[in-house]
Amino acid sequence: MESLHAPWRIEYILSPKPQLDTSLFTRIAQSNDDEANRVIVRDRTCFALLNTYPYNGGHLLIVPYKQVADLNGLTEEELADLWKLTRRCINALTQVMKPDGFNIGINLGKVAGAGIAEHLHIHVVPRWNGDTNFMPVIANTSVLPAALDEVAAKLRAELAK
């Protein structure tokens, strides 16, 4: 049997997981280094960034600035802004990456798969016909056809229009 490797994942697996009062998303929201954090757009109450450990190329996260664990922690205005930014990002991904569809979802709580359960975020995952093949299904490995920084730059440009 041939081995398949996804060496970029080990950095995350082995990295220390800080026990802080603020989430990773809160620290990114407060940072000025959008390029290093792969933030592609900032709006009034929320922002979007590329997932550093994506399920598929172009996997985005839409995050409110306010650190809340679920939808009930947001005002009506913040909730509307979150979904409006999700729509803008879907439109930008459509223009830049030409996907055939999307998976869009929220994992509420650790048991539901939330990696950062203390800070609500929406996953937007572009999908293409045939993108699920033996690599992700059997080998548990994704093949990303473009570097994250390149995708981030293209999406930033599209969202700035």
Image (cartoon, grey):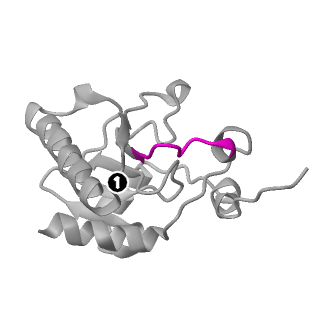
Is 129 a magenta residue? yes
Magenta stretch, main secondary structure, is loop
What residue is at 12 percent from the left and 55 percent from the top?
44
The answer to whether 99 appears left or right of 87 in the picture is right
Q: Is residue 38 visible?
A: yes
Please state the horizontal and vertical placement of residue 77, each as a whole percent of the image: 8, 37
The residue most toward the right is 1
**Residue located at (41% from left, 56% from top):** 58
| Residue 59 coordinates in the image, percent (x, y) | 42, 52
- Magenta region: 126-134
Mark 1 Cα shell of 10 Å, populated few (<14), some (14-19), many (≥20): some
In this rendering, would 127 be left or right of 4? left
The percent position of residue 32, horizontal first and vertical second, equals 29, 73
Q: Quadrant of residue 5?
A: bottom right
Mark 1 belongs to which amino acid?
A: Thr
Viewer-side residue, 112 vs 97: 97
Q: Is residue 105 above or below residue 35?
A: above
